Amino acid sequence: MNSHYYSSRFTLFVASLFMLSMTFMACGNDNDGGGLGPAPEPNIVEVASESGNFDILVQAIQDAGLAETLQQEGPIFTVFAPTDDAFEALPEGTLSNLSPEQLADILQFHVVNGEIESSDLQPTQDVETLLGEEILVEADGGVLINGYSNVVTADVEASNGIIHAVDAVLLPEGYRDANIIDQAVELGNFTTLASAVEQVGLTSTLKYKGDFTVFAPTDDAFAALPQGLLGSLSDAELTEILTYHVLSGEIFADQLNAEQAPASLEGGEVFVTKDGNGDVTVNGAASVVAADVDVSNGVIHAIDQVILPDAYGTVVDAASKRYNFESLVSAVVDAGLAGTLSDTEASYTVFAPTDDAFAAVESVVNSLTNQQLATVLSYHVLPVEVASGDLSAEQAPASLTDEAVYVTAADGNVTINGSASVVEADIMTNNGTIHAINEVILPNELLNVVQIASKNYDLSTLVSLVSDAGLAGTLSDENGTFTVFAPTNAAFDAVSTTLDGLSEAQVSEVLQYHVAGQEILSDNLPAPGNSTTVTTVQGEDITVAVDTEGNVTLNGSVNVTTVDLQGVNGVIHIIDGVLLPPSYTSN
């Protein structure tokens, strides 16, 4: 708490004496039948004089030449009146060292035109005083002035206004240690910031509340914004941007780690880094050009760019300011996708791998051409915006590559392609949403057939059976070539009784009957109305028929529902039934 902020309160005894004196005066003014009528109600100065707890205030009013003003019948005033204890808490000699003009400044800082009863107060309001400078009045159970002076007795009425007794003297600019606003104005290169703060009504908050840490954009930083941007913002939008520059509590430069992400008053995180030379960067781009301007209610760090909450930037902006997406941002730039993902007319969902996720597949990423890299990155992006709250238990939306991404949600956990977990959800921007994930997900063209099946939640039974049968290694051989007719989980459920009656060797044979030792794409199938046979690695044939509408069936009853999931060692076609070798069904 600032050394000028002193606090003392009326005791119950003093309050009782005050009320007793007021009662006595009321009784003494009763008409005694002499025909004189009731005595006039006392004015503000008279009420203060008669109370016995404002002697220093009354003397100061007289010394400053304000007695006549506060005694006149009009206008009406509200006085936040420091008690004698409040004045006595000031450093010794403070009042005696003031000129009458200085004393008048301080006293006028306690007086407001018009009558303000405590019941009229909102939770927060800025109130202009006779001095012309505003005070901050907060009402939440009690009434607090400028963040430190408590109203200890409210609503004492006088003929020309109302008195609220306060337990600390209020000090205007020039008589107090500089606060955030005072200092910013004095420095002279924050005029746009100060004007914007005043426009949205934050001036008194940043004067009298705190402690705060302010990343304060210079006038040059505001001038660098696109022309007309500030003027196009509503007060609510401007408030969000300004409060995004403010943190609760004091953080000096020497207290910073290499990386931290404190929450702003706006609610969003601010990403602050400090390098080995002590240079501080905010949100990946704004440099601290003057640090540690210490003020009475916090600290100011001047920055050379205006920083924006996520909602005012694109998915590229949101990723760029976070220090855990450096690899992703670099890859997006290298692949030529930054422009696409910065399109504010589009709407995206980005599953964004962290730097650790990229480090885990560094050798794979480094081996890719820029075209392949673009495909991998595009596979992490959906052309629609999907928040975590919009997810059902299972869904397979198409990515920018048109290939499906398999997303499951259970118990608040979101998984992508069967293994990548969402570690931070719902980073909302002006052109989409980012979900941070802990793995890089790869499109089919970089995976073998086992990996392709493993990421599809609808093929989990098949993957489990292939693993149990010891076939995963064979089907993962990237020197092999396979076509897999992959039954869904529902297909296996439909024949679970039959499979339960088979030995492990027989189950392995059934699985191998779904695999051909060559790559057969849908383009290789017979023309509509024709059929062919395919020899499987189990040794028996599958009959493949294409009807006149292009629908494909296997062995006359099992339908192919999804074709051409092509990987590095073959292709998968998803089917809705389990195929049993003819030798099994003929017995």
Image: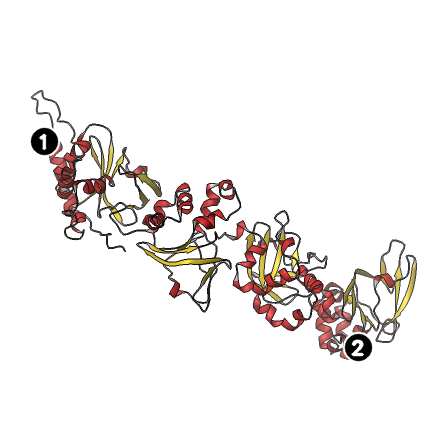
Residue 196 percent across, percent down from the top left: 42, 44
Q: Quadrant of the N terminus?
A: bottom left
User: Label 1: few (<14), some or many (≥20) within 10 Å?
Assistant: few
Decide which of 125, 15 is in the foreground and name it. 125
Q: Does residue 11 appear anywhere in the picture?
A: no
Decide which of 54, 466 is in the foreground and name it. 54
Decide which of 237, 17 is in the foreground and name it. 237
**Mark 1 or 2, closer to the camera:** 1
Q: Identify the residue shown where x is 19% and y is 32%.
A: 69
Q: Which residue is mark 2?
A: 506
At label 2, the amino acid type is Gln
Residue 300 percent across, percent down from the top left: 37, 55
Q: Does residue 283 appear anywhere in the picture?
A: yes
Residue 395 percent across, percent down from the top left: 67, 57
Residue furthest to the right in view is 530
Instruction: Measure the C-alpha gap from mark 1 to mark 2.
Output: 112 Å
At label 1, the amino acid type is Gly
Image quadrant assignment for residue 364:
bottom right
Describe the colour scheme in one phrase: secondary structure
- In the displayed structure, does residue 387 sit left or right of residue 578? left
Q: Which residue is mark 1?
A: 28
Q: Quadrant of the C terminus?
A: bottom right
User: Label 2: few (<14), some or many (≥20) within 10 Å?
Assistant: some
